[in-house]
Image (cartoon, rainbow, N blue to C red):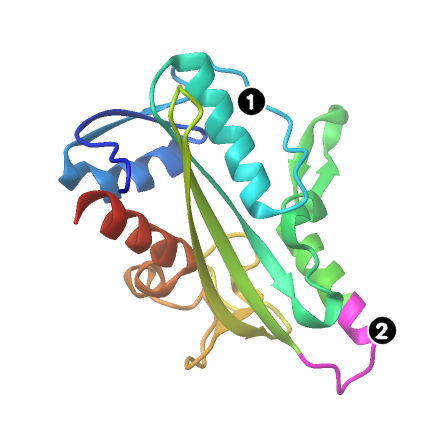
Amino acid sequence: MTRRIGAGSLVIATHNAGKLKEIAALLGPHGVNCLSAGSLGLPEPAETGTTFVENALIKARASAQASGIVSLADDSGLSVAALDGRPGVCTADWAERQWFEGKPGRDWYMAMGKVEGLLCEQGPETPRDAWFSCVLALAWPDGETAVYEGRVDGSLTWPPRGKLGFGYDPVFVPTGREVTFAELDPEEKHRISHRADAFAKLVADQFS
């Protein structure tokens, strides 16, 4: 029998206000009060896993143990078939660079260019199949966990197109569409995205 989180407080294992807002909007209708790990002053654990599932569980468990409250974490990224699934769990790392005065930052155009460069090295006939993955992990303070996985398939295009998305969205064309995620109406993107797929499974399991 599925263990339910029920109504009440849930810690979202993130320090990103935008992510908290997005998740709170999805879970609010089910009576869930979402708190961020950042607002509780919880530390960010090192994401040492080699899969999306492992990293999501690391973050969820850390928040649950530190707060004593059921916690939810997500881990997501882009995988490219011709690159043996890379960048995968290193999706964000490929965008990291040093900015002025030694401050770290992320350059997503650089990351997209790295993917394109590696594909070009393999020749013009290289398949451009790719997919976005999202893993949602729930963790209870006593150690029990639940995992929900979402995915959306598509292909990569170049040069980047659109200004509505973020990350690798400007080069990702979802299957059945002719526009990139960054050109797609945000409501439509949220309806078909990997995150929407994972949340639909979580909601069906936890609140149906």
Residue drawn at x 57%, y 52% as measured from the top left: 77
The relative height of residue 191 versus residue 68 in the rendered view (above or below) is below
Residues at marks 2 and 1, CA–CA distance in whole angstroms: 37 Å
In the rendered image, the residue lying farthest to the right is 121
| 119 within the magenta span | yes
Number of on-image labels: 2
Q: Secondary structure at mark 2?
A: helix
- The image quadrant that residue 23 belongs to is top left
12 lies left or right of 61: left
Residue drawn at x 42%, y 79% as measured from the top left: 177
Q: Nearer the viewer, residue 73 or 138?
A: 138
Q: Nearer the viewer, residue 2 or 39?
A: 2
| Image coordinates for residue 85, horizontal then vertical, percent | 68, 62
Residue named by callout 2: 121
Please report the bounds of the magenta region as a residue range.
Answer: 118-127
| Image coordinates for residue 12, horizontal then vertical, percent | 38, 29
- The image quadrant that residue 33 belongs to is top left
Residue drawn at x 74%, y 66% as measured from the top left: 83
Q: Amino acid at mark 2?
A: Glu
| Image coordinates for residue 175, horizontal then vertical, percent | 46, 78
Q: Amino acid at mark 1?
A: Glu
Mark 2 or mark 1, earlier in chain: 1
Q: Are marks 2 and 1 in contact (CB under 8 Å)?
A: no
78 lies left or right of 134: right
Residue named by callout 1: 44
